[in-house]
Each structure stands twice: as structure tokens, then as C-alpha cells.
Image (cartoon, grey):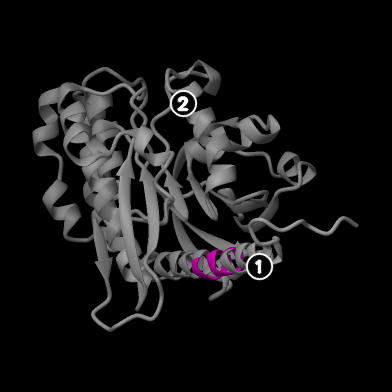
């Protein structure tokens, strides 16, 4: 899929790959979210998005059909020539990442991205997996799910976080990365939240690896969809505890409606009660106040890809010019 702003551009198209490992219910939505975010971030630049996924991620029949119809096989990524890569996470099942069925494939992807991309964004669980693969930094289980919209402060100067010093970012995760361990291993923290901890961190290797513990790509309804899923799991007896409301997300009116439903659900735990869930009323109240900041962040990333790719081409050209012409002898120092 490709998109370009109406105005003419002087830049060569930037090819971005998306390795979408999200659970089946979020596959299509994630692709819409990323495509919309990149389109808003692109400005006058032409951006082409190619979508891939790891076949080792467990899928239902419907999920397999979607992947087969809309995703390129992962083997096509190895020769794709993408400048940038975005890798999503998925819902963790095993306590240890290396016990996940897709771990060998994801580890290979980390290794490949370092040598074949200008920059890669690792999102949520993928950020934990990449830090573990690179430096053996283990994620830490949180006491409660980090769930909501959090104010994140810029704590370092970098092109990626140019813009307002404070921005809102959705987070949804059960694990987190220890900041002290990241710093000791040479990672640079770009933003953090007093409540949610580390938000964005980076490491410059052969590729600039960008790690996001949050989900700036989320649209207005994403956190609500996750909350409703967790409510359904409780009512169906699949989860022991009723989920907490995502912080900093719902309006006062939506919060009152959801807390009233919670009282009924705790009094009568029945899957049929989900039919009374106030989805429509709450949905009308939802907004995405983080959207502009998210587009700014991705615009900075696309700009980095453009300029870093240009510097790489210049370096390659200089190296080529310095090589002796075919059939001549090179000088020996």
C-alpha cells in the first residue's frame, strides 16, 4: 500500500516495512492505524508501506486468511530494501520470551534489521524482545497492568522527540523495562512518564533501533476495545479479576457509565451481561488527544530515514569513486 500527500515531492519514496504480529482481532485495525499515522506524518514525502508477519505467531483460521491475503511472506522482507521497519508486539503468553513459539523467528528479525535497515521501531512487546536479544535485558512483570494515557516528558535532545517537551502516549502492557539496566547497557532514554516509567529509548548500532513501550499509533477506540475484551474475559470466567479502567482516558460521563456496569457485573457474573455493556454511549465520548504528537514523532522518524539514507548513499558514492577503475592496479599504502 502506498500513499503520498497531494503536493508534489522532491524526495524519493521512502519504503517502510510493517511486521504485524498483533493478535487476530487487532490485525486489520493495527494496519489501518499505522497506515493512517504514516500518511499524516508523511507531509509532502511519498511513503510506501509493505506489510509482513511472522508465520510462527499462532493464528485462527480467519487470521491466517487475512495474513495470506494482505501480507507478504516474511521471506520477501529479506530482499525488500526497506529503509525503515516497524515491528509490533503481540499478547504475551509465556513468562519467558524465549518460550514463545515465534521467538526464533523474532530473534532472526532483530539480527536482520540491524544490518539491513536505516532504522527500526520496536513496539511494546517487540521492544522487550529486541532488548533481550541484543543485550540480555529482561522485562519485569508489573504489579498491575500499565493501562491508559500517560503524560511523557522529553528527557534528552534528539531529532525523534523534537517538538513539545510533554506529550500524551497510550500504554497497554503487563511488563516493563528497567531503566537502570537499559542505561548500563548503553541505551539512551528519550522520554519517560512519572507513572508509566520509560516511554521511548534508543540504541545506535548499524541501524538506529527505536524502542516504544507505548502505542502512539493507537486510534481513539483502541484502549476501549482492549478494556471491553478484558471485561468479556472476566464475565466468561477466563480472568479472575475485573479489569481496572484505563487511566487518563475516559471522560467523566463515560467513567460513570462504566463503573455502573461494573457494579452489575460484580453482582451477577454472566457472559450474557456483555450485551448491556454501554459500548455505544462510551464510544461517542472517545477522543485521541495524543494523535498530533504521535504524527509529529513519526514525521521526525521519516525525516531521519530520508536524511540518513541520503548520507548512506553519499558515503557509498564516495567509496565507489575511490575504487580503482576496472583493469587498473590500486595503490598500496
Label annotation for residue 133: none
Give the x, y percent position of residue 206: 65, 49
Looking at this view, is 208 or 165 the one in front? Answer: 208
> In the rendered structure, which segment of residues is drawn in magenta?
306-312
- Residue in the image at 54% along x and 19% along y: 98
Looking at this view, is 312 or 262 the one in front? Answer: 312
Dot in front, 1 or 2? 1
The C terminus, quarter of image: bottom right
Q: Marks 1 and 2, Cα distance to the nearest angstrom?
A: 38 Å
Q: Is residue 311 magenta?
A: yes
Precedes in sequence: disc 1 or disc 2: 2
The residue that disc 2 covers is: 105
Label annotation for residue 321: 1
Secondary structure, mark 2, is helix
The answer to whether marks 1 and 2 mark residues whose Cβ atoms lie closer than 8 Å is no
Looking at this view, is 212 or 326 the one in front? Answer: 326
- Residue in the image at 55% along x and 31% along y: 143
**89 in relation to 325, above or below:** above
Give the x, y percent position of residue 275: 9, 35
Name the image quarter holding residue 164.
bottom right
Amino acid at each position: 500500500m502506498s500513499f503520498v500527500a497531494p503536493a508534489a515531492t522532491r524526495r524519493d519514496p521512502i519504503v517502510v516495512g510493517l511486521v504485524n504480529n498483533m493478535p487476530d482481532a487487532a490485525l486489520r485495525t493495527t494496519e489501518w492505524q499505522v497506515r493512517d499515522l504514516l500518511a499524516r506524518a508523511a507531509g509532502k514525502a511519498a511513503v510506501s508501506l509493505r506489510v509482513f508477519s511472522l508465520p510462527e505467531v499462532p493464528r485462527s483460521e480467519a487470521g491466517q486468511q487475512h495474513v495470506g491475503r494482505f501480507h507478504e511472506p516474511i521471506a520477501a522482507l529479506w530482499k525488500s530494501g526497506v529503509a525503515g521497519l516497524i515491528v509490533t508486539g503481540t499478547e504475551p503468553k509465556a513468562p519467558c520470551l524465549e518460550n514463545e513459539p515465534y521467538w526464533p523467528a523474532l530473534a532472526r528479525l532483530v539480527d536482520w534489521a540491524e544490518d539491513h535497515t536505516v532504522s527500526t521501531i520496536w513496539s511494546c512487546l517487540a521492544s522487550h524482545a529486541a532488548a533481550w536479544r541484543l543485550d540480555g535485558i529482561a522485562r519485569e512483570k508489573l504489579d498491575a497492568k500499565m493501562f491508559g494515557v500517560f503524560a511523557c516528558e522529553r528527557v534528552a535532545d534528539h531529532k525523534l522527540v523534537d517538538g513539545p517537551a510533554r506529550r500524551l502516549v497510550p500504554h497497554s502492557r503487563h511488563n516493563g523495562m528497567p531503566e537502570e539496566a537499559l542505561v548500563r547497557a548503553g541505551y539512551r532514554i528519550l522520554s519517560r512518564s512519572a507513572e508509566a516509567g520509560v516511554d521511548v529509548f534508543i540504541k545506535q548500532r548499524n541501524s538506529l533501533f527505536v524502542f516504544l513501550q507505548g502505542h502512539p499509533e493507537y486510534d481513539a477506540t483502541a484502549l476501549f476495545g482492549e478494556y471491553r475484551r478484558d471485561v468479556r474475559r472476566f464475565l466468561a470466567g477466563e480472568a479472575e479479576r475485573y479489569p481496572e479502567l484505563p487511566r487518563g482516558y475516559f471522560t467523566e460521563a463515560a467513567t460513570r457509565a462504566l463503573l455502573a456496569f461494573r457494579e452489575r457485573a460484580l453482582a451477577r457474573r454472566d457472559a450474557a451481561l456483555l450485551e448491556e455493556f454501554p459500548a455505544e454511549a462510551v464510544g461517542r465520548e472517545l477522543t485521541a488527544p495524543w494523535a498530533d504528537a504521535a504524527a509529529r514523532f513519526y514525521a521526525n522518524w521519516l525525516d531521519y530515514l530520508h536524511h540518513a539514507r541520503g548520507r548512506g548513499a553519499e558515503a557509498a558514492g564516495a567509496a565507489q569513486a575511490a575504487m580503482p577503475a576496472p583493469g587498473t592496479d590500486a595503490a598500496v599504502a
